[in-house]
Amino acid sequence: MYKQEEVTFRNADVILAGTLTIPKKSGRHPAVILLPGSGPVNRDEEAFGWKPFRIISDYFTQNGTVVLRYDSRGVGGSTGDVYQSTFNDFAGDAIAAVQYLKRRKDINPDQIGLCGHSQGGIVAPIVASRSDDVAFIICVAGAGITGEECFITQFGMIDRLDGATDEDIEKLTDMRKQLFNLIRKDASETEIKPLLMKIAQTQTEIQEINEDKKREETLESLEEKLNCMLTLFNSPWGRFFLDYDPQAALEKIKCPVLLIFGEMDMQVLLEENKGAMVSALMKSGNSDFTVKTFPKANHLFQMAKSGHPSEYTELPKKYVPGFLEFMSDWILQHVDQVR
């Protein structure tokens, strides 16, 4: 079907390890670099029982595009630490990937693009705003609002699905804003943990009322949950994300852009983010951008019931109809294929 090669490249002292899939036809092919979502994930963006990036790589490559996917920092063959890094570091990793591909004889150096999911959909515009070597970008569930706004809207929507009232959401939002302010001040874990505990307990109470049953949670599992939240928020990654505004990068992009959203995405809400991203691209004067929303799609672009993250594991491990085809067709309209 196609060739596969294990590769490594370097961004300063960080080594990134990945897989390159190459169509069998000889020649200089267009290429796409896949940029994953947040957290420590492998090159397949493996989570919830499936491997989304392996599926994308397979489809794109069978249709004539080279694909590079790589382990995030600190995972698999890659060095570094995701939570000790920021979007600027990840953008540097992606630029290093572009430079690596440009040196290869089987890749067209003028037709290297990026396809980022979630966090990757925020990083891709940063890279395109800094490098003229990026031929196009695809932002899949990318954000157009600040990290704090993303968290507030995401958590609020999920709380509502869990049965929270307007009063509950207002109370939780106030606590989360207090948490974010503590994080900005580099507060200690001793200061942050009681507030995290209060937020977690309030969420559990709301879920218990909605489900009409008592949730059994051990001290060990609660401690594990709180430590995960501390790692997420109280880190260089978390502090950077809170105040990062994607608008500045989006307003500088001149290459073709495809924005893809899920109608039932409860992590990156459709209307808030689509409107902000389109507005920024219009300010840039970029006339070559396409916006596509997939009905019923959740944050992973599965066919959703409610969009709640708890569904990810339960739903079929496949993309909504037309998702892969739409992206691949859009790429092929913007590149020259090897014939």
Image (spheres, rainbow, N blue to C red):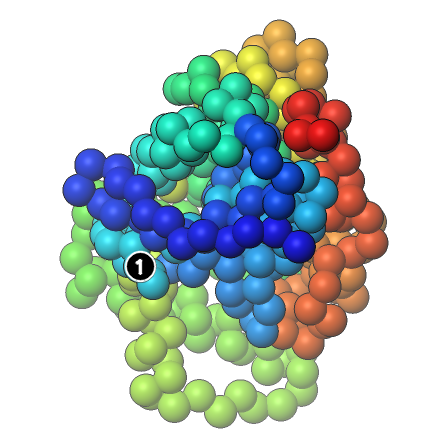
Residue drawn at the location 78% of the way across and 66% of the way down: 305
187 up-or-down from 226: above or below = above
Quadrant in which the N terminus appears: bottom right
Residue 179 seen: no
Residue bearing mark 1: 77
Quarter location, residue 330: top right
Residue drawn at the location 19% of the way across and 52% of the way down: 187
Left or right: where 84 falls relative to 119: left
Q: Position of residue 285 (x, y in %)?
A: 62, 8
198 up-or-down from 234: above or below = below
Residue farthest to the top, as pictured: 285
Q: Position of residue 83 (x, y in %)?
A: 29, 53
Residue drawn at the location 63% of the way across and 20% of the way down: 256
Q: Position of residue 250 (x, y in %)?
A: 52, 22
Mark 1: secondary structure:
loop
The residue type indicated by label 1 comes to: Gly
Residue farthest to the front, as pictured: 26
Q: Position of residue 118 (x, y in %)?
A: 54, 46
Quarter location, residue 136: top right
Residue 8 seen: yes
Quadrant in which the C terminus appears: top right
In-front residue for pair 107/10: 107
Residue drawn at the location 48% of the way across and 71% of the way down: 202
Quarter location, residue 240: top left
How many dots with numbers?
1
251 up-or-down from 103: above or below = above
Left or right: where 80 falls relative to 241: left
231 up-or-down from 8: above or below = below
In-front residue for pair 112/207: 112
Left or right: where 35 falls relative to 79: right
- Badge 1 crowding class, 10 Å Cα cut-off, few under 14, some 14 to 19, many 20 or more, is some
